Amino acid sequence: MSGKPISAARRVPDPIPPTGPDRGIGGEAVWTRVAVLAAFAAGPIVPVRAAGQALLLVRDGDRVFAVERACPHEGADLAGGRCAGGRLLCPHHRASFALADGAVSPGWSFRRLRTYPVRLVGDAVWVAAGQGAS
Ligand code: FES
């Protein structure tokens, strides 16, 4: 690891009113505490669940991103992929996705990977997921 502090991939306006898991109102995204930073000791890709969705936390250098776990192509488990240069590589057909916005690598015609806002509070990682998330 780099030893540099980790930052959330996206900054969201403060104050964030964290709500408990599955307490979304009106279809809005729900902030859920999904992990602590120590979870990255085993590797840069950490499977989590938020608002009933299977997601991945991905540490790329000093940043943490949250993305959907299933590849939008044929549903491969991206937890078995690799992270390099700001991209997540699918282990099945090797398409890659930009961690910042989910854009798929050139030559593929399926949709982008869904990404989710991340917020770090102390050593806790919070993710906004649910119907209102992107
Ligand atoms: S299943 Fe991921 S690129 Fe095909």
Image (cartoon, rainbow, N blue to C red):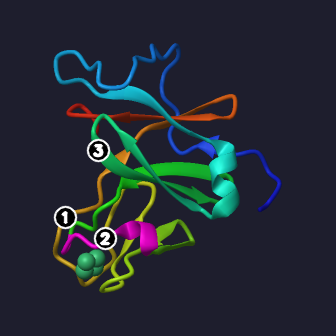
Residue 84 appears anywhere in the view = yes
Tell me where residue 99 sits by quadrant.
bottom left
Tell me where residue 117 sits by quadrant.
top left
User: Which secondary structure is most common in the magenta stretch?
Assistant: loop
Which circle's residue, 3 or 1, is located before the other in the chain? 3
Number of residue marks? 3
Q: Report the Cα–Cα distance between label 3 and label 1.
A: 18 Å
| Secondary structure beneath label 3 | strand
The magenta span reads 73-80
| Quarter of image, ligand 1 | bottom left
Residue placed under numbered mark 2 in the picture: 104
Residue 61 appears anywhere in the view = no
- With 103 as the anchor, is 2 left or right in this view? right
Q: Nearer the viewer, mark 3 or mark 1?
A: 3
| Secondary structure beneath label 2 | loop
Q: Could you tell me the amino acid type at mark 3?
A: Gln
Give residue 100's mark: none
Residue placed under numbered mark 3 in the picture: 53
Q: Could you tell me the amino acid type at mark 2?
A: Val
Which circle's residue, 1 or 2, is located before the other in the chain? 2
Tell me where residue 102 sits by quadrant.
bottom left
Work out which residue is located at the far right of the displayed protein and give it.
3
